[in-house]
Image (cartoon, rainbow, N blue to C red):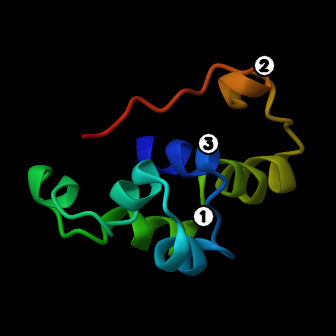
Amino acid sequence: FTAMVEAEEYGVTMENVDDMKANSTNPGIQRLLGVTPGMGEALGLDEAWAYNIIKQVGNYGESYEKNVTAKLGLERGLNALWTDGGLQYAWPVR
């Protein structure tokens, strides 16, 4: 969950995750996508764990849109990022 919210905060989507992994110079994005090693191992996962989630499921906003808004008609409201007036905030994973 946290990886999906963090991806949304960074603007990483299903569509651009490969480009972000290959070209981003942002240290947070590099850690999230496994470019900088260590985070996966520290969690007992492989380094591509968050990349795989984002590539297959999307970030939190994409998943919410696809599974809640589109199917149930519920807008984000408090489920939006904190920067958009909601309560969702990704604690840094390090």
Considering the numbered disc 3 on the image, is that residue within a helix, a strand or a loop?
helix
Q: Is residue 74 left or right of residue 19?
A: right
Q: Is residue 56 left or right of residue 87?
A: left
Whole-angstrom CA distance, mark 1 to mark 2, is 21 Å
Q: Which mark is residue 18?
A: none
Screen quadrant of the C terminus? top left
Screen quadrant of the N terminus? top left
Q: Is residue 18 left or right of residue 52?
A: right
Considering the numbered disc 2 on the image, is that residue within a helix, a strand or a loop?
loop
Instruction: Write down the residue under mark 2.
Output: 85
Of pointers 1 and 3, the one earlier in the residue sequence: 3
Whole-angstrom CA distance, mark 1 to mark 3, is 12 Å
In front: mark 2 or mark 3? 3
* Image-quadrant location for residue 13: bottom right
Q: Which residue is at 42% across, 48% downward?
A: 28
Q: Which mark is residue 9?
A: 3
x then y, percent, for residue 63 = 65, 56
x then y, percent, for residue 54 = 52, 66
Considering the numbered disc 1 on the image, is that residue within a helix, a strand or a loop?
loop
Of pointers 1 and 2, the one earlier in the residue sequence: 1
Q: Please, what is the three-letter code of the amino acid marked with disc 3?
A: Glu
Q: Please, what is the three-letter code of the amino acid marked with disc 1?
A: Gly
Q: Is residue 88 above or below residue 72?
A: above
Q: Which residue is at 85% across, 56% downward?
A: 70
Instruction: Write down the residue under mark 1.
Output: 58
Q: Are marks 2 and 3 in contact (CB under 8 Å)?
A: no
